Image (cartoon, grey):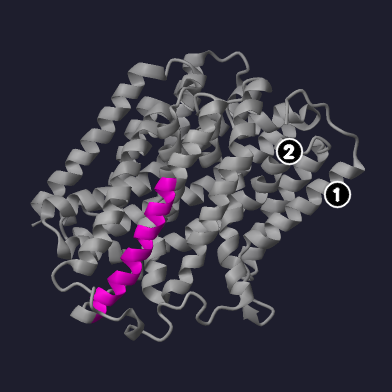
Amino acid sequence: MQAGTLISLAAYFVLMLGIGLYAWKKSTDTSEGYLLGGRQLSPAVAALSAGASDMSGWLLLGLPGALYAAGLVEAWIGIGLFVGALANWIVVAPRLRRQTEELGNALTIPEFLSNRFPDKGTALRVLSAIVVVVFFTVYTAAGLAGGGKLFETSFAGLFGDTGMSDYMTGIWLTAVVVLAYTMIGGFLAVSLTDFVQGCIMVVALVVMPLVVIFGPGGSAGESLTRVQPGFLDIGYGLTFIAWLSAVTWGLGYFGQPHIIVRFMAVRSVADVATARNIGMGWMFVCLIGALGVGLAGRAYAARNGIAVDDPETIFIVLANMLFHPLVTGFLLAALLAAIMSTISSQLLVSSSSLTEDFYRLFMRRSASEREIVNVGRASVVLVALAAIVIASDPESKVLGLVANAWAGFGAAFGPLVLLSLTWQRMTGAGAVAGLVTGAAVTLVWVQLGWNGAFLGGPGVYEIIPGFLASLVAIVGISLATAPTARTATA
């Protein structure tokens, strides 16, 4: 049974590596080519690349798992994300594409902020690069944990002769393949693989719920309301704080470097609207599919007496039970696609910060383009190794790790990016204050456990205090300091 599944997965791995080789021949000779694909992404590739790098294993593991465990009330996270993504495409995408080119052809978000606020340029590049590397290492660990769970659930015992657990073997296999095509082909490879992975993901998320509901032993005639009280009530047991913590996930979009860098790479500002329409359509279908997997999967398990120990593995469990091994391999490839598309994007953005905002800035200002590309490849490996160490705990919760990293970026960069693109009165001092405040408040909030329980009540998602504190710091300090010169249009 596992042979057919392994064949499909092997074909998927070969396809990803082939795309990496193709991209290597196209645009890895210069830092702009390696880190930004020469700013030549078509609308479709930019849209699905942004979407696939955004959703990660959370879409097929974390969200279905939350719905499986608690019911439709968990859909508020998806609703908040959809609204946030739409606002990101409308407000940030066209402005960032234009202004990064106008302000010194910036290749990274830290470099753009440095060019936007030259009086605090070095501080902004260093601080923002530190935030990028730290939070992306945690974020990458979440993706690798998803890869470990996939192999642990689907291929128990198959890799026993390696001397490692199935979980750690899955982590290493996932990491090695992602490292290979990311190091070889750079941003173009990551974007093209994202496009293919996005197509695989949407097909899987359409097929899986339909088979679960209408296939043999399916739950089409099963009343989901009998699974548990309020299972299909989107407001069941929902407090205002819990609702706010769910929908404010959408605020994180404005500050996710691995997503908004796609806006910088799209072919032209005129292509942004087309990319937005493609991307939002893809996201809508995927979110509906993920809801279907979680809800229908719970009904299917209840009807057929199936015990699912870890709700986050419901997609994997259903793929193994309901489909021919070759199709199962395709579905598991969809999960790997979600995981790997995000990991590769995060590794590349971390690499770009280490090379452009540390190495070139402080160590080798005169470094050649080839040297920068090679340093970038080495940086990809370093970040990946750190993430493997973090992900090595088998108890890692994908949704929890993603939630922390998402909030960190959203609070640190969200208000900073939004106001730097839209408010001319913003100053460099305000930018530094907002970046530091947003990151610090988020970290402190998590360390104090207030995201789990706050003042005797339910926890408050850390992005809320972090985002608000950053916003107040930027506006307050900017109004109290002299305006910063600006040479780009709003």
Instruction: Provide residue 161's location: percent of width, then percent of height.
Output: 16, 53
Instruction: Provide residue 67's location: percent of width, then percent of height.
Output: 40, 70
Quarter of the picture containing the C terminus is top right
Look at 60% across and 49% down and name the residue there.
Answer: 409
Give the mark, 2 or 1, whose residue is nearer the N terminus. 2
Q: Residues within 10 Å of mark 2 (few under 14, many from 20)?
A: some
* Secondary structure of residue under mark 2: helix
Residue 290's disc number = none
Q: Residues within 10 Å of mark 1 (few under 14, many from 20)?
A: some
Residue denoted by label 1: 476
Q: Is residue 253 left or right of residue 157?
A: right
Magenta-highlighted stretch: main secondary structure? Answer: helix
Residue span colored magenta:
281-302
* Secondary structure of residue under mark 1: helix
Instruction: Provide residue 343's location: percent of width, then percent of height.
Output: 41, 44
Look at 32% across and 52% down and name the residue there.
Answer: 147
Measure the alpha-carbon separation of dots 2 and 1: 16 Å
Residue denoted by label 2: 422
Q: Is residue 221 above or below residue 394?
A: below
- Could one spot residue 352 in this view of the protein? yes
> Would you say residue 283 sits in the magenta stretch?
yes
Q: Of the residues shown, which amino acid type is indicated by label 1?
A: Gly
Q: Of the residues shown, which amino acid type is indicated by label 2?
A: Thr
